[in-house]
Image (spheres, rainbow, N blue to C red):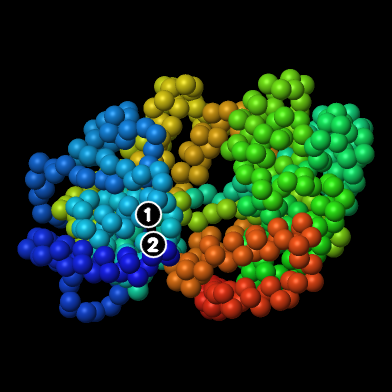
Amino acid sequence: MKNRRWLALLLGTGLVLAAAGCGSSGNNGANGNNSSGGEATKAPAKTEAPATKEPESDTKPELRVLNLWSKDDYNTHPLAKVIEERTGYKVNYEMLPADKAMDKLNLLISSAEAYDVISIAGDKAIYTDYAKMGALVDLGPLIEEYGDNIKASISEDSFEAMKVDGKIYSIPNRSSEFAGYNLMIRTDWLEKLDLQMPTTLDEFTAVLKAFQDKDPGGTGGKGAPMSIDGALATVANITGAFGIATGWSDQGGKLVATAQNPGFKEYLTYMADLYKQGLIDKEFAVNKDATLKEKFTSGQIGVIQLPWFDIPTVADALNKNFPEAKFAYLPALKGKDGKMGIGMSGGYDRITFIPKSAKHPEDAIKWINAKLEPETFKLISLGEEGKHYTYSDGVYSPILPIFTDERGLASSYLTGIDEVNYPIYWQARVKKDERLFAGFSYLNREIPAEGRVADPLAFAPSLPEYAKNNASLNQMINDFAVKVIVGEESPDAVTEFAAKFDAAGGAASAKEINEWYAGTKK
């Protein structure tokens, strides 16, 4: 993680102050300061609550909660009132800045700001650092005493993935596994040329050549059949045809990074050949996301990579310029040996923890637990039936615009989810636009299961070497891929590149990853 030494120094100073300020709180066990030793805290089992508890005071403290940035004010959004009424806790919500959020959070943690609850994006690396540096409360004892709904909602696998040195310091929001990116093609161009939707890599190449030779978009040679984002040079679906659907792939029982994957050289050779033939936009290396979409919606490009959640925006812009334009996702393209695959995302999209500086750690857990009471969780996620949503044939459909107005920010208020029901509730958010739902459904329901490849690291525990190196290694892969595609490097340079990749942390990451992966097979 960036600035780790600086963070360690800050935390060292800040935690001394935090200890001085909180030493007499009487919550030493709850805050992880119990020095009695003993066995590491295990993931909380889904047990019944104790038969009796000490009577609680009717007076509940106001909680101070730090959340991710939002364009909406958490305090004035309708959900704030709903949550207060259902839990009995008044909450003062604050948010991190949109830019350099983690730099700001490092300063807040190091200065022992008294937040009761903090939620961040699913960055297990920074969370793990905080836990190892003693900045977080051990939640195991608190969950065991006050967390019946937490234990019933969150799987032991998820808690296991959050453990640091055998203890639980956070409550994760487990995200659903789904395919997010694929290649989108102008189907009206296919129809104009009397072409079928391609299903193999060879057929796809032939379609690109037809787009180039016959110019169905009438660009006069100013466009190109396909373009990609320069920051995403390993293109979804095409990589799958070479056996590289995810960043780390199972090869003979071991996980191998893209740089070491046998199909990487073949993928680069294929893409470099498309570029030489003019089938890929010559400016792709400098394309940003917005540039790519503008080229597609202005009719210059026939194929781009597009996530399903961007479909409505792109559709509106394209149809404004070309009212008769149509587009659709490609199927999972098969390579010469039958390989195919569209990678699926997964993991934890939000992590919630209680800092050591919290004034009310027990109440923070009680608040989180109250939000996970089944009917309360459903009310937060979906709203009221007949007012915010309808339910028919197992499908929740939003009532617009009130669903968006009053539940559009729901995911940002969740501090732990009902892992069984939330993936079902969540799809109501996709149904707010039928085009959005159609794209999501195609990728995740119509493409056959064998064409969708789960990320083997999605739900892995904290892996320090991998976390430390992953961003820079991914950047290395992308930079190298761009150079090969544009002809600055030869595909034959893959072997030399793989050695550099290993030396830059790839080998250490692979060792750590496969030690964990071997354990999952026992």
| Label 1: element kind | helix
Q: Nearer the viewer, residue 64 or 444?
A: 64
Q: Residue at x 85, y 56 (%)?
A: 273
Tell me the tag on residue 478.
Answer: none
Q: Nearer the viewer, residue 339 or 281?
A: 281
Q: Position of residue 15 (x, y in %)?
A: 20, 65
Q: Residue at x 45, y 27 (%)?
A: 404
- Amino acid type, label 1: Met
| Label 2: element kind | helix
Q: Residue at x 63, y 75 (%)?
A: 500
Q: Quadrant of residue 151?
A: bottom left
Check disc 1 and report the residue beneath it. Answer: 102
Q: Is residue 267 visible?
A: no
Left or right of 500, for residue 486: right
Q: Position of residue 26 (x, y in %)?
A: 9, 62
Left or right of 361, for residue 473: right
Q: CA distance from mark 1 to mark 2?
A: 8 Å
Check disc 2 and report the residue beneath it. Answer: 126
Q: Residue at x 75, y 72 (%)?
A: 493
Circle 2 Cα neighbour tier, 10 Å, few/some/many (<14 / 14–19 / ≥20) = many
